[in-house]
Amino acid sequence: MIRSTNRLTLAAALALALGAGSASAQDSDPEAGAINQLQLNDVWADMDVYVPESTGAAVSTATSLGNTAAALRISGDVSSEITQTFDARSTATNRLRGYSAGTAVATTTSYGNASQGGTDYGSNAYYADQTASGLVEAYTDIELLGASELASATTAIANVSSTDNNYGESDASQVQQSSADVIAETDADMCCDGYYASFATSAGANATSSTGYTSTNINRVQQETAAGSSVQAATDVYMNDGNNVSAVTNAFGNSATVYNEWGYASLGQEGEPVEQRNGADIDAQTYVTLDHWSGYATASSYGVGNSALISNVGSDTAIYANQTNDGTVGSQASFSGQSWVGGTGMVSATSIGNAATATVCNYCSDAAVGGRINQTNSGQVYAYGQATSVYGNGIYGSATAIGNSATLQSAGE
């Protein structure tokens, strides 16, 4: 039964998903609907968690979304069309501060447009058209004396679109355009951690993703970032005494990913390739300073103009992609510290103008991988790494800059 062919509000779209478990969900006709959203004023989320004394857990979350839409069904067929326009400022700020916590978690997320669609035991027909301009930013500030375990994730993306299908088939078409500036920053100043401290910072203009299991997974993607726009991600960590410290920073212009298992999967098609054009400047920076550390310490930065990645298990896989990067892509990673107990330090800075990879695991089948990839890079690409350590078991550093990278590979026979 078709519930509606008119424009639906977000609440109605979510109700569509919640109602999928009713008797009408057993009908053979798909749930179908359209969502049209326009955001023209600022959205802002701010969270401040302060712990004056030691506590078992301290959790801080800030989420800012300009437009968000979902067309989901528990089982059966679903068909959706989503159009989103964002021309404003989306800001998420998150502070976690005070004395100490057994477990400390800080999660900060800012999106201009976000949409998703999917179903199980049925077909998913999904179309999303997203346009973003203005500013999308996320900031995390951690000032704790200490924590036994600490995890921080800071994410800012102008356009996000995702699909998921299990035991069925998915046919997705996704169009994304961004002229927005995107900023994600993490700043941590602490004395100590007990077991581990993990900091992840990610900024991007356009991102699509698709997942499936025992599913036929077809994906068409068009992504473009405007010249003059920028994507910046930065992580800055200082600790007096750190144990197993990891700081990872990612910045990208356009990203399209597919992860599938046991079913034909394609990213782009013959005659309808993925089109990615990046004109934005991309910058990823990571700085880690530890007066002393034990275990491992990692400072990693990764910047990419265009990224197309498909991975499949057990079934044929294809990628068809045209990638053009005109923006400057840079990464910087720096580590400084000393370890009197034999700690290991790792520094990695990687920058790529265009990256495309198709992988199939065929240990248990005769699945093949193929397709066609065209790449053009005219932007400057640079990677810079620096490591300083007086004592320690070892320091390992790597700086890699690549204009174009393309891989078709099978893991198995």
Image (cartoon, rainbow, N blue to C red):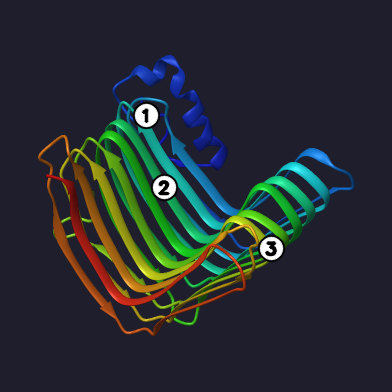
Q: Circle 2 is placed at which residue position? A: 162
> Is the residue 80 above or below the residue 252 in the image?
above
The structure residue drawn at horizontal position 64% and vertical position 69%, both measured from the top left corner, is 337
The structure residue drawn at horizontal position 40% and vertical position 18%, both measured from the top left corner, is 24
The secondary structure type at the circle numbered 3 is: strand
> Is the residue 340 above or below the residue 4 in the image?
below
- Quarter where residue 55 is shown: top right
Q: Which mark is residue 211?
A: none
Q: Residues within 10 Å of mark 3 (few under 14, many from 20)?
A: many
- Mark 3 vs 2, N-terminal side: 2
In-front residue for pair 408/40: 408
The secondary structure type at the circle numbered 2 is: strand
Q: Position of residue 73 (x, y in %)?
A: 42, 30
Q: Position of residue 212 (x, y in %)?
A: 32, 38
Q: Position of residue 125 (x, y in %)?
A: 31, 41
Q: Circle 3 is placed at which residue position? A: 292
Q: Amino acid at mark 1?
A: Ile
- Mark 1 vs 2, N-terminal side: 1
Q: CA distance from mark 1 to mark 3?
A: 63 Å
Q: Circle 1 is placed at which residue position? A: 2
- Quarter where residue 312 is shown: top left
The secondary structure type at the circle numbered 1 is: loop
Q: Amino acid at mark 2?
A: Ser
| Whether residue 153 is visible | no
The structure residue drawn at horizontal position 40% and vertical position 62%, both measured from the top left corner, is 176
The structure residue drawn at horizontal position 23% and vertical position 66%, both measured from the top left corner, is 406
